[in-house]
Image (cartoon, grey):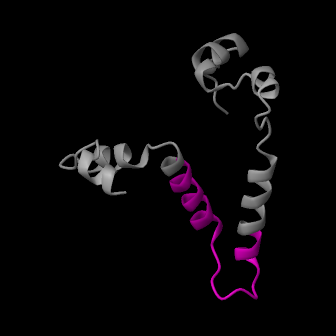
């Protein structure tokens, strides 16, 4: 068991406040306030891949790594991660490539 002191709720909220949505504001602007539809889709896709009748199956480790990669793509962090792993790689994408995409 980890005996290091863990930060309290206030410290967590202070450190992560930019990532915590304002649900009241989202509701007032008729924006989505739930990720349930995304979670159910992920659960559906992952469970389909674990079924033995499918031609291709994922291991739990493979599914976990795939989801981690997808999250990095959605957060625009994947290139920075590769640049950290491979120091010769530029962290930022050249503007010409962004425009081509």
Which image quadrant: the C terminus?
bottom left
In this view, 100 is above or below 10: below
Q: Nearer the viewer, residue 37 or 6?
A: 37
Does 51 appear in magenta? yes
Q: Nearer the viewer, residue 1 or 24?
A: 24
Does 64 appear in magenta? yes
Query: Is 42 positioned to the left or the right of 14 in the image?
Result: right
Give the residues in magenta.
Answer: 47-71
In this view, 3 is above or below 56: above
In this view, 93 is above or below 47: above
Q: Position of residue 18 (x, y in %)?
A: 59, 21
Which residue is drawn at the image coordinates 37% and 46% (left, top)?
81
In this view, 11 is above or below 42: above
Q: Position of residue 16 (x, y in %)?
A: 60, 21
Which image quadrant: the N terminus?
top right
Query: Is 80 positioned to the left or the right of 74 in the image?
Result: left
Which residue is drawn at the image coordinates 66% and 89% (left, top)?
55
Which residue is drawn at the image coordinates 22% and 49% (left, top)?
89
Query: Is 76 positioned to the left or the right of 54 in the image?
Result: left
Q: Position of residue 64 (x, y in %)?
A: 61, 59
Q: Which quadrant of the structure image shows residue 91? A: top left
Magenta segment's dominant SS is helix
């Amino acid at each position: 068991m980890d005996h290091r002191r863990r930060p309290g709720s206030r410290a967590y909220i202070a450190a992560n406040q930019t990532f915590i949505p304002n649900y009241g504001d989202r509701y007032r602007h008729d924006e989505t306030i739930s990720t349930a539809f995304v979670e159910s889709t992920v659960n559906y896709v992952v469970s389909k891949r674990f079924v033995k009748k499918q031609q291709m199956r994922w291991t739990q480790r493979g599914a976990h790594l795939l989801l981690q990669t997808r999250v990095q793509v959605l957060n625009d962090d994947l290139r920075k991660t590769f640049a950290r792993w491979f120091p010769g790689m530029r962290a930022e994408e050249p503007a010409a490539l962004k425009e081509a995409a």
